[in-house]
Amino acid sequence: MRISGLESLGLDGMLITDGAKGGAYHDFSADQVFEVAGISVIPVDTTGVDDTFCSYFIRRLSLGEDPQTALTCANPAAALKVTRLGTTDAIPSLQEVMEFAP
């Protein structure tokens, strides 16, 4: 999911979510793209899914994980979130994500 022209924005990187198709992190400083494919689930409520994906991704990076590992955690968190009604109260715990992850 490489998107050209983003480097000109002056950012170090950009996280892009693409719903059921997965997501990608463009690391402009290293000229790398890290990607994850979507996880097939039956969606119930997509409210807050991008917040879930982004927060899991950023949290894992803040713990020192590399972008691919962070994406690999964020992706099932988002997939699990859409199977639940609600927003903040529907965000899965890390334990739930680890048990759900393929």
Image (tube, rainbow, N blue to C red):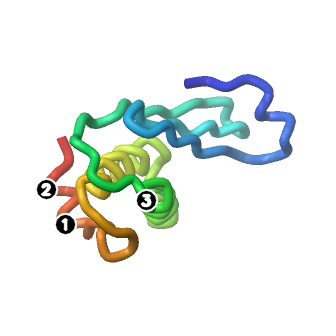
Mark 1 surroundings within 10 Å by alpha-carbon count, few (fewer than 14), some (14 through 19), many (20 or more): few
- Position of residue 80 relative to residue 38, above or below, is below
The quadrant of the image that shows the C terminus is top left
Disc 2 + disc 3, Cβ < 8 Å: no
97, 82: nearer the viewer: 82
Q: Residues within 10 Å of mark 2 (few under 14, many from 20)?
A: few
Check disc 2 and give the amino acid type.
Glu
Q: Name the disc covering residue 87, or none.
A: none
In the rendered image, the vertical position of residue 22 relative to residue 4, given as above or below: below
Farthest-out residue, bottom: 89
Residue placed under numbered mark 2 in the picture = 99
The residue closer to the viewer here, 73 or 41, is 41
From the image, tell me which residue sits under label 3: 47
Whether residues under marks 2 and 1 lie with C-beta atoms below 8 angstroms apart, the answer is yes
Sequence order check: which comes first, mark 2 or mark 3? 3
> Mark 2 or 3, which is nearer the eye?
3
Q: Residue at x 39, y 46 (%)?
A: 69
Q: In the rendered view, would you say 75 is above or below 51?
A: above
Q: Is residue 58 above or below residue 90?
A: above
Corner quadrant of residue 27: top right
Quote the CA–CA distance across marks 2 and 3: 22 Å
Q: Which mark is residue 95?
A: 1
